[in-house]
Amino acid sequence: MNQSAPHLTTSPPTFTQLLSSTRRGARLARLLTVSQLRSWGAPQDLTERAEIVVAELAANAVLHGSVPGRSFRLTLAFEAFPGLLRIDVTDARGDRWPQARPPVSDVPDAVLHTGGRGLSLVAAIADRWETLPYPPCGKTVRAELVSRV
């Protein structure tokens, strides 16, 4: 009887919600993120950073990734140890991938007054971010945040 016990792997808790591609849907994504992270007992620093990242990614999904009649998806996955949060925002516009802009100090004032800071903000706050295809025709912008406490 020298059998070892089977190792069960557990996946981190996740939260997924489809939201309307409207300003109200983007606001709801931010509010749901804060509520869910608090229910998971996530550290306050992580929750505050996630709120900003989700607000920016959801706004981009609504402004640049929407297709009439299609929603966007918010997915959160939180690993309490080591304090890692993965944020996925998926929209229907796989043909329009986000482009990182130069640092805010290098952007002319005229551009700053018309937008364009969102992904620079995400890049500054997130520990890592990337864009992935979401077949058959969408994309997912993924950001990862690690707790600093």
Image: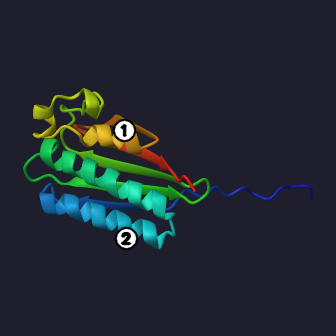
- The answer to whether residue 14 is above or below residue 88 is below
Judge by depth and name the residue closer to the eye, 59 or 75. Answer: 59
Q: Amino acid at mark 2?
A: Ser
Q: Secondary structure at mark 1?
A: helix
Q: Position of residue 24 (x, y in %)?
A: 15, 63
Judge by depth and name the residue closer to the eye, 128 or 93. Answer: 128
Residue lying at the far bottom in this picture: please name it: 39
Give the residue number, with chain letter if any, for mark 1.
Answer: 123
Q: Please report the residue visible at 13 percent of the width from the left and 46 percent of the height from the top.
A: 63
- Work out whether mark 2 precedes mark 1 in sequence or the reverse, and give the earlier one: 2
- The answer to whether residue 66 is above or below residue 44 is above
Judge by depth and name the residue closer to the eye, 136 or 129. Answer: 129
Q: Secondary structure at mark 2?
A: helix
The residues bearing labels 2 and 1 have C-alpha atoms spaced at a distance of: 23 Å
Q: Is residue 33 visible?
A: yes
Badge 2: residue crowd in 10 Å (few <14, some 14–19, many ≥20)? some
Residue lying at the far right in this picture: please name it: 1
Residue lying at the far left in this picture: please name it: 68
Q: Please report the residue visible at 37 percent of the width from the left and 38 percent of the height from the top.
A: 123
Q: Position of residue 89 (x, y in %)?
A: 30, 49
Q: Please report the residue visible at 32 percent of the width from the left and 67 percent of the height from the top.
A: 32
Q: Position of residue 148 (x, y in %)?
A: 55, 52
Quarter occupied by the C terminus: bottom right
Locate residue 33 relative to residue 111 in the image: left or right.
right
Quarter-of-image position of residue 106? top left
Badge 1: residue crowd in 10 Å (few <14, some 14–19, many ≥20)? some
Give the residue number, with chain letter if any, for mark 2.
Answer: 35
Q: Amino acid at mark 1?
A: Ala
Q: Please report the residue visible at 28 percent of the width from the left and 39 percent of the height from the top.
A: 119
